[in-house]
Image: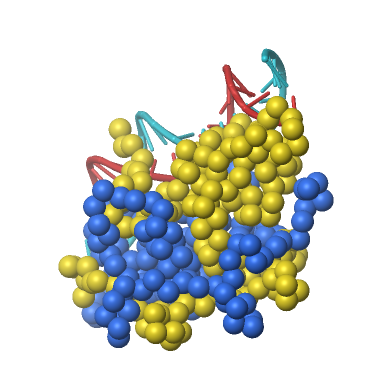
Chain colours: A yellow, B blue, C red, D cyan
Amino acid sequence: MAKRTSLKDNACPIARSMESIGDCWSMLIIRDAMMGLRRFSEFQKHLGLAKNILTTRLRALVADGILTTEPASDGSAYQDYVLTPKGRAVFPIMVALRQWGEDFAFAPGEATNIMVDRKAGKRVRPLELHAADGRLLGVGDTAIKPVASAG
Amino acid sequence: MAKRTSLKDNACPIARSMESIGDCWSMLIIRDAMMGLRRFSEFQKHLGLAKNILTTRLRALVADGILTTEPASDGSAYQDYVLTPKGRAVFPIMVALRQWGEDFAFAPGEATNIMVDRKAGKRVRPLELHAADGRLLGVGDTAIKPVASAG
DNA sequence: CCGTATCCATTCCGATACTG
DNA sequence: CAGTATCGGAATGGATACGG
């Protein structure tokens, strides 16, 4: 009774995205992969989660085409987990999440992993939404096709 | 045994963000709120979830400062749920999620809710990451403070 | 080092029934 | 309309022990 509703095939792309990456561990694994981590133990140590959970998440991410496995770069018999283009494309989401978290969800300490612009040598706070004509967009500048029942 | 680890106070802003909005229903409620929905029944009908779950999520979002309640605009005895500034600030995340979903998570049908640029009258595909100097950023242009064990 | 296999507790989700 | 109360069941998270 009452299977949990899957949003994988939902018509809304936001719902589909959330179904793929709307999970804390998955997102943090992607974050760590963007930081250059690629080995099972690296993820496990850095995230501090149980190994079976990490296994599950890695498998799901591979099945989703976000990560892929390749022969270990150090010549060992194991594999590296590396981002696919689809996985690297999560980058804007990551930056948006980071900035929102910094602006609106405060933590006791300071962030341990600061995303920096390597060349400029400073923090990246660059997220902007531009329309095709170059104009900066905000919430007030956008609309969504209204729902039938809505006002 | 084994309480689920909370990331509310995690040092990483991405983890904190995911803890607040890294939930399908919460994100979709915010989406609908951005679409102009504000009444309990509107959310319930449009999302198709059980009322008790909607209640829980709305409460959490209010407690998180993402939504706030105000007297119903139609004069009824009930309340409207409207986005706070913190809630409206989720907009860039929403756009990033939408674009990623459109680009990489295909669905059988077409999207029902297309985010459009009202003035230009066309689809918004504007997400870009700019450094402070105006240069466009990608994954390759950024780095994160390396972890001790990495490398 | 890289997982797999159990096991248990908790949480969460959805349905339904009920109230003002 | 806008919730609350309750319940069964499913899924998940985490600990731990084990195997190649």
- List x then y, in percent, for residue A81: 62, 41
* Front in this rendered view, residue D16 or B119: B119
Q: Is residue B86 visible?
A: no
Res B28 seen here: yes
Residue sitting farthest toward the right: B148
The quadrant the N terminus of chain B occupies is: top right
Report the number of discs.
0
Q: Quadrant of residue A42?
A: top right
Q: Residue at x 52, y 78 (%)?
A: A128
Residue A20 against residue A117 in the figure, above or below: above
Up-down: is C11 above or below B70? Answer: above
Write the residue at 29% across / 67% down. B114
The residue at the point 40 percent across, 80 percent down is A131
Quick check: A77 above or below A122?
A: above
Query: In x, y percent, where is residue B6?
Result: 62, 51
**Image quadrant in which you'd find residue C9:** top right
**Foreground of the two, B1 or A27:** A27
Residue A54 falls in which quadrant of the image? Answer: top right
Tell me where residue B129 appears, x and y as whole percent.
55, 73
Q: Position of residue A95 (x, y in %)?
A: 58, 66
Horizontal side of residue A61 vs B44, given as left or right: right
